Image (cartoon, grey):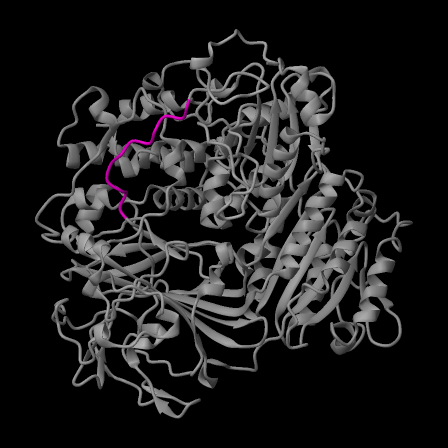
Amino acid sequence: MYSNSPIVPPHQRGPASAYGPSPPATPPIRNGPSPPPAPAPYPDGRRARRHYPTFAQQQPQQQQPFPPQTSTPSPAMANMQDPVHTNAGLVNNMANMNLYNNPPSRDDIALVGQAPPIHDLDLPSPVPHIDQNVSVTPSPYAQSRATIMRSTLNRVPNSSGLLKKSKLPLALLIEPYSSLNNASEDIPVVSDTVIARCTRCKSYINPFVRFSQGALKWQCNLCGLENDVPSAFDWDPMTQQTVDRWQRAELNHGCVDFVASAEYMVRPPQPPAYVFVIDTTYPAVQCGMVGIVANAILASLDKIPNEDGRTKIAFITVDSAVGFYKLTGGEPEMLVVGDLDDIYLPRASSDLLVELADARTVIEDLLERLKTMHNGTHSVNNCFGTALQAGRKLLSSTGGKIICFQGNVPTVGSGVGKPTEAKKEITENTLMTPSSSFYRTFATECAKAQVCADMFIFGTGPVADVATMNVIPRFTGGQTHFYPGFSGNNPADCERLFNEVQHLLGEKIGLEAVMRTRCSPGLVCHAFHGNCITRVPDIMALPNVPRDQSYCIELNIEDEIQASHVYFQTALLYTTCFGERRIRVINLCLPVARALPEVFASADQVAIARTLCHQAIDKAVTYKLKDARDLLAKAMIDIASAYAREVIGSVASGAARLSLGRNLSMLPFLILAILKTDTFNDAATIHMDKRAQATVLLRTLPHSLWLNYIAPKFYALHNMPQQAGLPDPNTGRCTMPPRMNLSSEKLERHGCYLLHDGQNIYIWISKEAVPQLCIDLLGVPSVAQVQSGKVARIPLQENPFCKRVCNIVSSIQKDHQGAYYPSLYIVGEGGDPMLRVEFLSHLVEDRLPNGPAAAGANLQTVSSGMSYFQWLGFVRAKCQ
């Protein structure tokens, strides 16, 4: 109706659109066997090699003393169906017959010549298939959910040689304290403090143990030792009656929280304590950061966890000296310390770090004053490192969080560095090199005192030195937020900062935590990734357990595995923000594979890509960016070659040299997407701070947001289905348009599109967009009047199209899960050229302007500018 395109006969048209013809229908997803499920780990991280006496593998058919099938289900299991007695259970049992004799069916896809099946990324995470009677009860929740723990391989190779032949990484991805989809709220709590542990390997009783000797003993599924069942295991101290053992949560759920007894405490539970360190130098004040931060903290006071009234708060401001604030009495009092070589507390810590409930009025008064009290400053010197030392002194007796707002790099006192842009070719540089060694030492001291630091970094100068400032969150379990070119006059910048501060302060964090992962004999944890510090040999120390951070543990196979299943158990010992010591135990059982086709059929491509990304980051931090890029390319080539040689059975020329199973068909796309992120991109135009922040995101984002970050979601708005942008009648959530491939071939000359990667939302207006679209969406008469740039929100126009687009944007922003609030950009095709390039750089399948012009097969080294088809040609040519 308003299109500049040729008239199309009605019988050839797609859904009606006022702004142009509809794109062809999304091709159906090809049917085939579901990708193999992903596994989850067990407590106690990496450890020195342990030798257990061999024990006979329990037969799944072994009769248990108290058959779970005859027990009365508990309320928590009221809706639980016995999988053995359902059709689904029958199908699964049939599927598991002759498990190691019949090769799994294959659905090989020749990748060259067809677009990547982007909709596969929206499929649920694969879950491991195990026999129904491997667990001691018929509970469908015996395995931990894949959102909490998953493995790169859902069948573990039985030997190191088999794993090496596959070229696939073996690792566990863990999100132990996730709030996504209310994951933590659904975890059952065992509150009777009856905690049964193996006396040899210290693992916790779980759904995969076996009972013997009249149910008086339980056999550890990790080391095989028989242990005594605690006398109180079948007793309810509240009702003073015996209980049905088979109803206990730890025998029915793969992930449970135990309320810890006194033996798990070395001191009273730590109270939540927050020390705010705020930069008040001239650049910080002029950019408007100080006032917005004060407003955000003031609005968040009721959201800070404080159920038991123990939460404590302190404030420190910093310029050329350190400002403390006495918060007892009738009004706040500022105390300035100028001795930067030996910082000290000018008052007793109880006057500076006060309970929020008792000093609420004084704290509110101080925050109101902070909005303007430093407006007249002319100080440009910044002693931020010294202020951090002061914050640690305040928290040394209790532990807690230092929340830092930095507008200028340190110039005096401790921690002064000289960050400069690299002079060499970008790929010859080391990634994330700090400009001062002070912060690594400081982070170690913080971790010992159970102190965590979160950084909010504002790019007010040429260099913000994100790589250096991130060192403290990196080793204390914190988070890093970066705001390049922040301006308090930009409502979009203010909204993002305000939302992220509120989100951080409202998190129900875990405190003073340690995490270990234990494995079955023959397996060992050998590398750890994530924001934590590793204590020898295998403990991950987390002064703070933020919601929705991810951790990766790489595994080695040291001895041949004789058993039919292996087990992993991760235990997180932590203190809740309301003062309760708990142990979160996460269990995973995986079958063992004895042939390479089984290994490849069980691969989880997204988990593999994430693990390779962690390996590449470590390589870039230790060696050069070039080495990390080569690692990613070589891994993809090796996996494709191994599949052709070991599964297809040949290395024939042509398409067969680059065919993969359906469950691995998106792996080349994911590796290319990683290579095109700001972390690994070889474009010299990417600022060092932007590259550093991208590395932080790749290392810490929860799994679903990490996938969205490297593979953004791309929608057409001008011809979206009529139900898009409206609430789903079943879930109440906003219905999204169909997802499209990340290719400029999808961009029509008159179209309007939305792309988001979880950090930013881009709305693209094509240069031939019809006036009616511009009027309906933005209230401007033509595309020439579209203003490109960052905006807080789309001005709501009184028409259905604008309301639906606003619903989509609002859903992405308000329903965002994780620590980062997405910014919104309007991108006119003929507008800001830098913003246009930024949008187009997210189209992973396209060749970038700096990309090679030659065919991929003719290239000797990998380039971030390659198109998807050049990349496939490069990989195919290198496969041997």
Location of residue 533 in the rendering, given as x and y in whole percent from the top left corner:
48, 61
Which residue sits at x=21%, y=83%?
215
Q: How many marks?
A: 0
Location of residue 34 in the rendering, given as x and y in whole percent from the top left corner:
27, 42
Which residue sits at x=66%, y=62%?
402
Which residue sits at x=82%, y=60%?
367
Q: Quadrant of residue 643?
A: top left
865 above or below 34? Answer: above
Is 26 inside the magenta-drawn segment?
yes
Which residues fall within the magenta stretch? 25-36
Which residue sits at x=46%, y=9%?
9
Is 392 inside the magenta-drawn segment?
no
Tell me if 507 is positioned left or right of 526 in this view: right
Location of residue 484 in the rendering, given as x and y in whole percent from the top left corner:
68, 39
Q: Is residue 477 visible?
A: yes
Tell me if 282 is positioned left or right of 788 in this view: right
Q: Is residue 326 visible?
A: no
Tell me if 309 is positioned left or right of 509 in this view: right
Image quadrant containing the C terminus: top left
Q: Residue furthest bottom?
A: 240
Image quadrant containing the N terminus: top right
728 above or below 875? Answer: below
Main SS, magenta residues: loop
Q: Quadrant of residue 656?
A: top left
Q: Residue furthest front?
A: 10
Q: Residue furthest top?
A: 6
The residue lying toward the viewer, choosing from 758 and 352, is 758
264 above or below 427? Answer: below
Location of residue 219 in the rendering, given as x and y in whole percent from the top left corner:
21, 77
